[in-house]
Amino acid sequence: MQVAYYPGCTLASKAKAFDQTARWVAQKLDVELIELPQWQCCGGLVPQVTDTVMGLLAPIRILADAQAISDRLMTLCSFCYNTLKRANFAFQRDSERRQKVTDFLEQQYDGNLKVVHMLELIRDEIGFDTVRSKVTKPLTGVRVAPYYGCLLLRPPKEIGLDDPEDPTVMEQLLEALGCEVVDFPRKVECCGSFMIAHRPELAAQCSTTILRSASSFGAQLLVTSCPLCQFNLDWQQMRMLESNGEISPVPVIYFTQLMALAMGAEPHLLGFEQHLVDPRPTVMELGL
Amino acid sequence: MKQLAEQIARTDEVPILLTEEAQKFTQEVIGRSGERVDWCYQCGKCTAGCPVTFAMDIEPSRVMRLVQLGQEERVLRSKAIWLCVGCQTCTTRCPQEIDIAKVMDTLREMATEKGYAADREVVTFFKSFLDNIRKYGRTFEPMLVFQYNLKSGHLFQDADKAPLLLSKGKLPMRPSKGSMSVQRIFDALEGNKR
């Protein structure tokens, strides 16, 4: 299976571990990821500002480039996924904005590309049974809590990946890897997002609530698909562990890192050294 | 959207007698966002689900009510509209299917246009973010942080994080290679503003 791939800025910088494990896992699952030859930022949250054409232009250019390669574009970062999918949605339905964007585009795009998240690709096309068959190191008894955050799921009418209040795609994946799934009530709550830049004290409060909840439900690892969630929870957790012992460490890793671990990737490929709260002691303690 | 605003103006769907000025504000918000703020019946689900309610001066459901009542200044001057991070929980849960996050977005646009932008820091952050993309094509965080700190006056915010982040490979020294056409597009768009 061949799929166009858009890594996005964070996966080329802060979240390299996410990118490298995803590529490794894709290869194991016989998916050929074709990275767009030249790509720029998708625009983050800016494209959602409704009165601007500029916002739509960045994501639509990416979709146009992808269409030259494949009929679908896979991405991993929740921000990029949300932005690209919503831009596509607007382009397909809002003829006025579509026309304006087309005038500036410098290339052709017909709106028919499908934007998919790797989780979607695994669930709908590859199948959890295939994942299960590739597991060489089942994570039996490891208590993992899936954390979805916001942008992977909402707004549901435009994203439609899963149930916005009680999603199950990551749970199913974790089961295929042999984990014990920890369901905790804050799994779709916001981590504080980009407030980490301009109101860090508020982002800290949001992240703390999520971490306390996951910890109190007995999670040993938290799994996410968003580099910003990962950073916020990792950063806040490091500070909580430094200042007091109110929680035991719950390292926050990407779902692709956990997949690579269960599928027997060499430890140096996992990128655990890039985390602020190091997952290696936990992983070692669990005998993995 | 204009039609929608006119329809509301024609009928007496706005149940409380408002001054013409106040009605104008309500209709402008509805017209620009395309969202029926007038359908809100104050169930409070948005406020209950919002992750930043605790820090807001006016909760989301009250923002909706104040828009219905045409309280332009109170709404556009509020800090609340700038604390919304667009997590879409309110939008997802609203029983009247009002896209509340989009309304917040419209209110931020209006506050900026009318000179009310109370929390300038987030505006500064977004401007720094766009400048960063214009220059590099991709986000280059070290420059983004530097520029934001310089402009917002928080000169040393997060400076203590730098050595740790550097050692974890989270602060690249060079921007990753983006597309140079981005600058051209920014320029083209600025020559063609609405």
Image: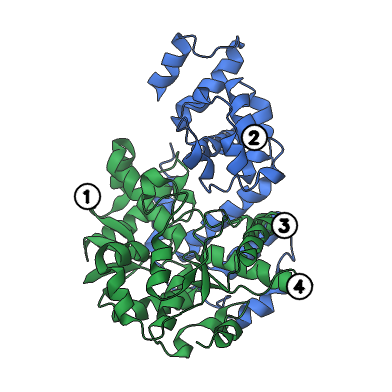
Chain colours: A green, B blue
Q: Within 10 angstroms of label 3, few (less than 14), some, or many (20 or more) residues?
A: few
Distance, label 3 to label 1, CA atoms, is 44 Å
Distance, label 3 to label 2, CA atoms, is 26 Å
Relative depth, front residue between B59 and A285: A285
Residue identifier under label 2: B115
Up the image or down, A276 lies above or below A127; here it is: below
Q: Residue at x 62, y 11 (%)?
A: B19
Question: Which quadrant of the figure has residue B10?
Answer: top left
- Chain under callout 4: A
Q: Is residue B63 visible?
A: yes
> The residue under label 1 is which amino acid type?
Asp
- Chain under callout 2: B
The earlier-in-sequence mark between 3 and 1 is 1
In front of the other: label 3 or label 4?
4
Question: x%, y% of residue A149?
Answer: 52, 57
Residue identifier under label 4: A245
Residue identifier under label 1: A110
The earlier-in-sequence mark between 4 and 1 is 1
Circle 2/circle 4 CB separation < 8 Å: no
Question: x%, y% of residue A234?
Answer: 61, 70
Q: Within 10 angstroms of label 2, few (less than 14), some, or many (20 or more) residues?
A: few
- Chain under callout 1: A
Q: Residue at x 55, y 24 (%)?
A: B41
Point out which mark residue A201 bears: 3
